[in-house]
Image (tube, coloured by chain):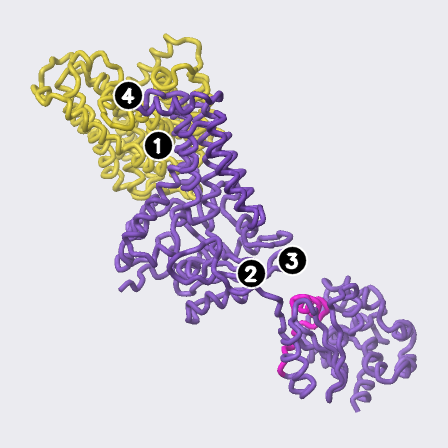
Chain colours: A yellow, B purple
Amino acid sequence: MDVKKKKVLNSYHVVFLVQNIMIGMGLLSLNHTLSAVGYGQWWFPLLFGVVANITLIPMIWISLQYQDDDLFDIHEKLLGKWIGKLINTLLIVYAVIIFAAVIQKYLDLIQVSVLSDRTIMGHLIIFLLLAIFIIKGGIKSLARFCILTFFVTGWMVYYLKWGIADGEITHLLPLFNFNKLEFFDAFKNGYTAMVGYELIMVYFPYIIKPYKAFKHATIGIWNTIFFYISVTFVGTMYFSEWQLEHLLFPVLKLFQAVDLSFIEQIDTFALTIWVFLMLTTVGGYLWMAKKGMDSVRNKNSQFHIYVAAVLVFIVINLPFPMFLAKLYETIFLISFGVILWPILLIAIHSVRKMKKGVVR
Amino acid sequence: MKIWKRKKRIVVGSKEKSVSPEQTTSKESDVEKETAKNPSPEQTPLKKSNSEDATSDKSNSEEAIAKKSSSEQTTSKKPSQKQITSKEPSSEHTTLKLPSPKQATLKLPSPTRKSPMRLTLKNIPLESIKSELTDIDDAIFKEFQTKQGLVTIVYFSSLIESLLLHKTVVTPLVNDAEKAFETFDNIEQRNMQVILSSISNGDTILYYHEKQKFVKAKTYSPPQRAITSSENESTVIGPQDAFTESLATNLSLIKRRIQQPGLKNKDQTIGKETNTKISVLYIDHIVNNENLKLINERLDKLTYEGFFDITILKQLIEDNPYSVFPQFLLTSKPDAAVQFLLDGRIVIAMENSQSVLVLPVSFFEMFTSTEDFYNRWTTTSLLRTIRFLGFFITIMLTPLYISVLSYHSGVLPFELLIIIQESRSKVPFPPVIEVLFIELVIEVLREAGSRMPTKIGQTIGIVGGIVIGTAAVEAGLVSNILIVLVAISALLSFSLPNFLMSNASRVIRYIFILAAGLFGLLGQFIAFAWLFNHLLNLTSLGSPYMTPVIPRAWSDMYNSIIRFPLSFIKKRSRLSRSKQVKKASK
């Protein structure tokens, strides 16, 4: 029943969608990606939050101009049918590759640390099936899943307590002990963890209260920042600079510090529960790819979900590991472009509007 | 005198007929006035064959029966009719003179009447009913000679208690037949089908030969079970009475708890062959009309053969029939049904079913029991927490054993790992096989226990206990620790108040076991994600199944895992979307 209605997303749905699509693999390696600035990294998420909030403004603004259209429709309206469709196709590719990048990174990690004697093929298929299963229920299904994900995974913040206890508080100062290059390096690598909120342009027409979307998305972003900053804060205290630089997934190491009498290696649990966070992230992009195909082919079809999933499967199984690694690295740089893209759209929009005004 | 009057009419009618037999049907007015019936079905038999006798004029649906009965009708009539229609009206007088005087006067007018519909009212002959009820040995025909002439009563003796029949039908009939005739119900649509179906519903049909009229008396009184306490949903505190298999009893159990005219019950008959009665109950000023409309639509669409229990109906009208989870609640306790009615839910009761259906319900309500409201709020909160967590523990515990031992042995502290490894040092199977084996044995035990006669049932417990508890471990088939885990999860699965939900939990556990066997903890959490997604997408009568968690409703939180004191629960649940959200709570 929910699938058929157009406006389905309530305020809290938006909050959790924004938040949970953002949190994913980025959080696991956040300390590492920010390691270029050393101990000064712990306040970086605050900076990210501000930047994300600023870049959110053009997204919401352009979406508000076309309230019933998603990003793909806006492209076709602003850029004409053919250029629009071309860009939409590129966006589909973008969504598929981000999907593949995220999932491969995660499954590789699983292979290394949890299921060491397995290939990723089995998990990959099941994972894809589950993502399809979630997205088949539409965006609201994903939004609900996001809410549950928050409650299933959010409590893991508690495990950072041991990190604080073992950490060294003096690591937190000084704040600005880095140069310009290091700053840009850290920013470039670290901001990949923030990617995900640009999807609001795709599910914007489904939001019941579009004028409040900015507020709710902001809450979502700052929720994310809370988790990020707690991780960087504890990480900075707990790790040495050398560790920050050389540990690929420091959060797991933080979890290993947990000391309970009946259980060890909390990181195994954390990593496997992380599957929820991965599903929400991946689900968002799968949905984006589906919507893109809908708009390019001018018809809504559940079949597109399968197509997108198969594409992901193919990308992951491409026999060019070096190329793929490069691709995954660059796709996140492209995502910065996608985040900034609405600014260009606004420019086109205003130019067209001015022209129309002149004609009138 | 009467006879003469009739004769006159016949003559008039026959004249008209002689002019144009087809047109006449629309013309005759005085005849139709008496029995307003639509003329359309009557025309067809006229055109088909000229021989319309008393029974052939029933509406289309009854034609089949009518044919049979007409053929068996007094043989003397048929030839006469043919004569009338084929020949001149004068020949009709000959028919009037025909056989035994009493019958002839009553029956003969019929063939010549232009409005066959009128005749249906009076002239369904008893013989045709008799012929329909041949080979039904408990169909009783009894004749009584009263002041009103001969009266025949027809009933199924197996559906009617003889004492009741005597009190309600026979005694008044013998004492004052005239009064009895007035007090008994008229059969409004007097056609064969109605009469037959009311006989098979347990009514007694009275046929007044002189008036040629049928009346019926409601005498349905099949043997019934007494009201006992519920065996499946036993409670310690609170009323102990439970529903029985009789719809009337169940309705009275509910109605005596809600004594106001706002409580409606709409009866309906479903089941193509069984004609089972159901009753849809709701409180008019509380229930959500959309819900009511939705359930009525679903009930109207039903074309199922037969209903023996309300669970069949439940499966047919559920939102997602493929799901493992029950989406409507079954309860056999009237106090539970009443509690849901007051919340604005709809309750469906069915004849021959000792539980009623409550809809819509949420996932969480599967973990609640009526006793929760009789206990102190603190006790209830504790019990609900145990049940709710129990559900998740019961599906996760044994799979955890598998994934820890097969894939992630580092998760356990060294001492614990040693204990477990020691206990399964003799076991030659991988943990998945071990767990599957013991879970299946438990399942078989449970199934055998519930199928066995109760006297032998105890043996099963002892045999099962010894075989599994000691022998299997000593033989080295399973480990001690696993026995403990399996026992805990089995116990927890039975602690759920809802039997269907506890069944569902056991089915799901196997999915988790297989997932854990395949992918360890990752598999378990993927299965968990699947479970949550499935639950999130389920609806109960169009309302989300996972309320109040998602979509959140803060007012519902007062009555969730922690049940607040009663005065805190000021609103009806969001799920029922009732017309009056606020309720009196002080």
Q: Which residue is label 4 attached to?
A: A337
Residue at the spot of label 3: B274
Circle 2 residue:
B245
Seen in the image, is B47 located left or right of residue B554? right
CA gap between label 4 and label 3 equals: 68 Å
Please state the horizontal and vertical placement of residue A294, each as a whole percent of the image.
Answer: 45, 30
Q: Secondary structure at mark 2?
A: loop
The span from disc 3 to disc 2 (Cα, nearest Å) is 15 Å
Q: Chain of mark 3?
A: B
Give the quarter of the image for residue B102.
bottom right
Disc 3 and disc 1: Cα gap in Å? 54 Å
Instruction: Please report the bounds of the magenta region as a residue range.
Output: B183-202
Asked whether the residues under the numbered discs 3 and 1 touch, taking CB atoms below 8 Å apart as contact, a structural biologist would say: no
Identify whether A243 is placed above or below A296.
Answer: above
Could you say where residue B135 lies in the image, as x and y percent from the top left?
79, 63
Between residue A301 and residue B497, name the one nearer to us: B497
Q: Which residue is labeled 1 in the image?
A: A202
Chain containing the residue with disc 1: A
